[in-house]
Image (cartoon, coloured by chain):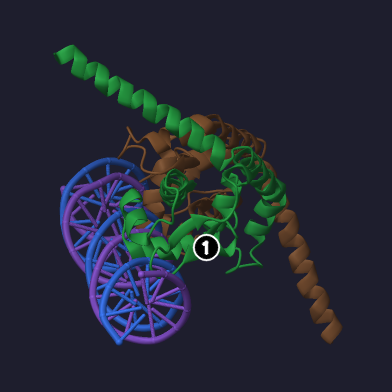
Chain colours: A green, B brown, C purple, D blue
Amino acid sequence: MIRDSRLSSVLHGLLHMIGAGEPVTSEQLAQAMATNPVVVRRVMAGLREQGLVHSEKGHGGGWTLARDPADITLADIYRAVGAPTIVAMGHRSENPGCLVEQAVNDALGDTFREVEALFLKRLGAVTLEALARDFKRRLAKHKQSLEDQIHAVK
Amino acid sequence: MIRDSRLSSVLHGLLHMIGAGEPVTSEQLAQAMATNPVVVRRVMAGLREQGLVHSEKGHGGGWTLARDPADITLADIYRAVGAPTIVAMGHRSENPGCLVEQAVNDALGDTFREVEALFLKRLGAVTLEALARDFKRRLAKHKQSLEDQIHAVK
DNA sequence: CCGTCATGTAACATATGAAGTTACATGATC
DNA sequence: GATCATGTAACTTCATATGTTACATGACGG
């Protein structure tokens, strides 16, 4: 079962970065990601290794996107956040000789790879830029809705 | 990430059941599944609710298949073992109003459903009977291989 | 019936891994 | 060199899956 709360969390942080025109500190990201600074650094370290973000120390330091958001897809992020294989069964590494698992893997091995490929393909079709645009649209709509409510009360 | 060690474990148990012509006790299944009887009952309870297996108390009691193995697919088992949704992101139930997650779900909601559908479709194409046959084939081959080794030593 | 064997299930214990925390080192800017 | 930020190791929760104990329920065989 795919259940990555980290991907969701990281996206919060990245959208926040796009909004700000300057480096964002781990402290600030921790707010956006509803966690604490050290966890932010830990997670962002993965993205940095993949060349998605850049970090700077000292005054005015913090995190920035290392690439154009239009060149970053959700697949990049998903991989960087650490999802080696999407589908895995049993204790393949523990009992590689188990005949039951051999039979299952023979019957479904291709399926596992196929499902994973489909998932990543779709993730790869969504850029961070597209997501940010959609998010901004929702935000504007949300604000409008709030204002309408205020007017209605008056 | 799909990572169901239970499916693999349950398959061990079910193949064992097919082999035996009589009810198999939780104790015996626990051996086959490398766990203990209570866990077996817990897991098998899910299969029973789906009408895949049947349990009988008392002398000569135990677990039996409730259906022809040719009519049971791995999808049935996967579902019964408890995998409501394969793909899920974030804490949708916690922050249903979160705009970031709304954007992600809008962009990938169909993908999630699609990936899950593909996975279940492939699982649905493999019957327990087919798996059992393949397993037996491997077992025979394995035995043969062992005998060959013995002969070679002589 | 009554003893035995098996499942059914609640309640608790343990283990595993993710997430959070503390502490301190490193490097950059002022 | 004081301050601000990341980098990282070590430790502490926390959640969840799994294992365990204990006992109730029901079935069969005498």
Q: Residue furthest left?
A: A154
Image-based side of B61 in relation to D14, left or right: right
Q: Position of residue A15 (x, y in %)?
A: 45, 44
- Which residue is the site of mark 1? A46
Image spot of residue B67 (x, y percent): 54, 35
Foreground pick, D10 / D29: D10
Q: Is residue B48 above or below residue A97?
A: above
Q: Left or right of B99: which side holds B140?
A: right
Residue at point 38%, 51% (across, down): B41
- Taking the spot 15% from the left edge, 14% from the top edge, the residue there is A153
Residue D7 in the image: x percent, y percent? 46, 73
In this view, the residue in front, A25 or A80, is A25
Q: Could you say which is closer to the camera, residue A25 or residue B13?
A: A25
Q: From what the image shows, is residue A43 above or below residue B98?
A: below
Q: Is residue A115 left or right of residue B62?
A: right
Q: Position of residue B57 (x, y in %)?
A: 35, 46
Parent chain of label 1: A
- Identified by mark 1, the residue type is Gly
Q: Establish if C14 lies above or below A105.
A: below
Asked whether residue A40 is in view, the answer is: yes
Above or below, A6 against B154 in this view is above
Q: Is residue B59 visible?
A: no
Which is more toward the observer, A90 or A114? A114
Dot 1, how many residues are within 10 Å of its Cα: few (below 14), some (14-19), or many (20+)? Answer: some
Instruction: Give the total number of marks visible in the rendering.
Output: 1
Q: Secondary structure at mark 1?
A: helix
Q: Quadrant of the C terminus of chain A?
A: top left
